[in-house]
Image (cartoon, coloured by chain):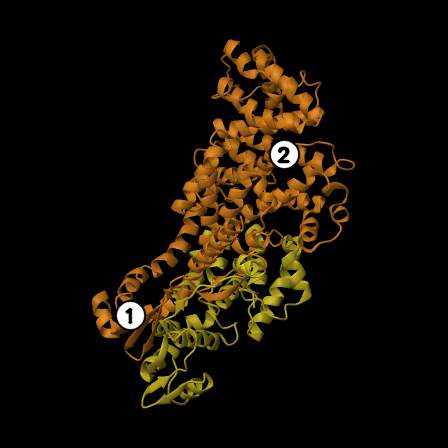
Chain colours: A orange, B yellow
Amino acid sequence: MNYEEDIDITNEVDLVVSAYPVQDDDLDEELLAADQSAQQYQEIQIPEVVKKFILLFHRSVLENNVYELQSIYEHSFNKLTEKFYANESWPEPEGISSLVNDDQVFLTLYRELYYRHIYSRLTPTIEHRFHSYENYCDLFNYILNSEGPVALELPNQWLWDIIDEFIYQFQSFCNYRNRIKNKTKEELALLRDNSQIWSCYSVLNVLYSLIQKSRITEQLLVSKNGGDMVEAAGEYGSRPLYKMLGYFSIVGLLRVHCLLGDFTLALKMMDNIELNKKQALFARVTACHVTTYYYVGFAYMMMRRYADAIKAFSHILTFINRTKQYHTRSYQHDQINKKGDQMYALLAICFISPNGPNLEDPEVIEQGVTFEPVQHYTKIFMAEVQHSILLPTLRSYLKLYTTMGNAKLASFLEIEPEQLRTLLMMAKMRSRQIKWVEGTLLEGEYQGTSDLDFCLKQDMIHVSEAKIGRRYGDWFLRNINKFQDILGGLELSSRA
Amino acid sequence: MTRVANTPSNRPEVIQSLIDGVDRYNPDNVSILEEYLATQCSNREVDVMANLAILKLYQFNPHLINDQVVNNILVKALTTLPEPDFNLCLYLLNEQMVTEEPVVRLITLRDLIEQARFKDFWNVYESGDEIYKELTAEVLGFEDSIRKNIAIAVAMTFQSIEAPILEGYLHLKGQAFLEFVKIQGWTEANGVVSIPINKDNEAKTTVLTENIKFEQLTKIIGHSND
């Protein structure tokens, strides 16, 4: 492969993105016309090196050359994007169909990248959003509803990105739909007439279908409890494409349910995935690894299981830190660092509302009502934070004393003694959390989480602290071993 | 013992399979879950996973929303505070519902319980022409459940407490108060209620000592065979 050289000697060609003019209700007709003109335009415009790239890409897909596809997907595509398509879309899929003998499967895969590039670099129009959705439907239909399992093989990274991007575009669409202001009548009409596009049910349906087809749950159970893996996996699940898509769909559901504010259901999705297992499948793709822990941590946090949340976040932050140097060159890098920063700042994720505004209601449209799910969630969460706001101050005082009168401490805190009593009871209630010990993520035991404890005997507060005793064991162990080594050495030299 | 929060021991099989499978998304199943909620309201049990499944169906199918059911789910969740159930339910409601009067009132009650302002809780609960009592009317034994949780918070915090203060927290007086104290296994003498030591209210200074694992000793044991 020699693209870098080729790129350097090829003349740069400025491409013009053809914007779809939409004034007509009949979208398809308009699009067809636009496609045709774009096609004619782009056949002349596609640089030679890009044509070569597409030919190699097509061949690699036909030959199931995962190794080559990996390189195409992770490097060549991004390099060419930087060179030619930093601010423009990639050539229209229709414009390249003659290059690939109108291979529909390849074109579907190409469109996946084509729209994903538009989402990340440009601003997708409503038509882009609709068509990308339809393309995902085509892709999943091909995978799920062909006669027997399809022969296609793709790199794990790409399979993860397909699920990840599918959910991202769903999320993006929900937010887009919520902003009624600045939308034209035509756009509103399109949204109203196509309510099934990017609907919650359709997205969940895809993810659950992939899980069922791949029999991934059965496979995970066998790997946990033992049994016949070939039998558990079945015809579809024994192929890497299905197995990985099924697995990634589980993590995808974890994310979707978090976005929808259903944190118990989110963690329930992970019932059969063992987070603490060394060679877990999610660790094969870094982005999946990070996503998994991020949403598990987030769900725990929203369920007030702070000890578990901290454990999940610190695991993945350490991981990001440790592996930083290895993936600085990959395009995933930015994404992962962003997630890392988000976790450090504990920024709320972008919640979505599943239904969006009622577009049948003229009042809603007239007023341009905007539903902001993030604010809704923040309000609920902040109430909880506000309740706890005095606790750190209380704690810092308690640390200074072993016994203290209730009235005296109340005067330090400038509150009434009765208020202090309630504050102390609240601190007690808060210190007891469910913490994971074994089993599924939702399971756990009540445990005290504070190293500072206290009790009240009428109006006297008694404080106690958990101290960490000195550790002798390790020191003795090391020195016993050292001593043995010296003895052994002496015996050897005396024999000699 | 490991447990999933608030799972009743005798969850019916049909409910279990709804919770575990994709049938939980089928709007036709909402009535089964609603009936199960009605059972919980009369037998004083709470199954938060099942109730969240109702709210999930409502979230996806707003036309199904039954305000009384939502109300009862939230009242049930009040009885499990300080567990996070109440908030987990709120996250599934849409913004408009959370700003409506009945839900706002229940949020007020939540705030007071969460902040352990038990006396204020009863004051608000008794105020305004029985309006709060009407909200909680369909949940049998609501007051008792709240009182039970207050007793837990008190027993975590106090070894002894003046009776008048405790009366305020429990909203009980005279014979009823003394009986409640007795049932808890607490004792009252000279206007002070004593609470037996438990692991939450003992406030014992603990020293965390190290544990040496057997694996760390393998080398030393190996030496002894030399």
In the depicted structure, whether residue A202 falls above or below residue B168? above
User: Residue B175: horizontal and vertical position, in percent?
Assistant: 41, 90
Q: Is residue B205 something that shows in the picture?
A: yes
Q: Is residue A19 something that shows in the picture?
A: no
Mark 2 and mark 1 lie on one chain; the one further toward the N terminus is 2
Quadrant of the image containing the N terminus of chain A: top right
Q: Relative to the observer, which residue lies in front, A126 or A326?
A: A326
**Callout 2: few (<14), some (14-19), or many (20+) C-alpha neighbours within 10 Å?**
some
Q: Relative to the observer, which residue lies in front, A149 or A370?
A: A149
For the residues marked 2 and 1, what is the alpha-carbon distance in whole angstroms? 58 Å
Q: Residue at x 47, y 62 (%)?
A: B86
Q: From the viewer's perspective, is the residue at label 2 or at label 1 nearer?
A: 1
Instruction: Evaluate if marks 2 and 1 touch, with contact meaning CB atoms under 8 Å apart.
Output: no
- Kindly state the secondary structure of the residue where label 2 is placed: helix
Chain letter for the residue marked with disc 2 in the picture: A
- Kindly state the secondary structure of the residue where label 1 is placed: helix
Residue pointed to by mark 1: A420
Residue pointed to by mark 2: A136
In the depicted structure, whether residue B102 falls above or below residue A82? below
User: Residue A421: horizontal and vertical position, in percent?
Assistant: 31, 72
Q: Relative to the observer, which residue lies in front, A150 or B180?
A: A150
In the depicted structure, whether residue A118 falls above or below residue A443? above
Q: Residue at x 66, y 25 (%)?
A: A107
Q: Residue at x 56, y 22 (%)?
A: A76
* Mark sitting on residue B143: none
User: Residue A223: horizontal and vertical position, in percent?
Assistant: 68, 51
Quick check: B193 left or right of A403?
A: right
Chain letter for the residue marked with disc 1 in the picture: A
Asked if marks 2 and 1 fall on the same chain, the answer is yes
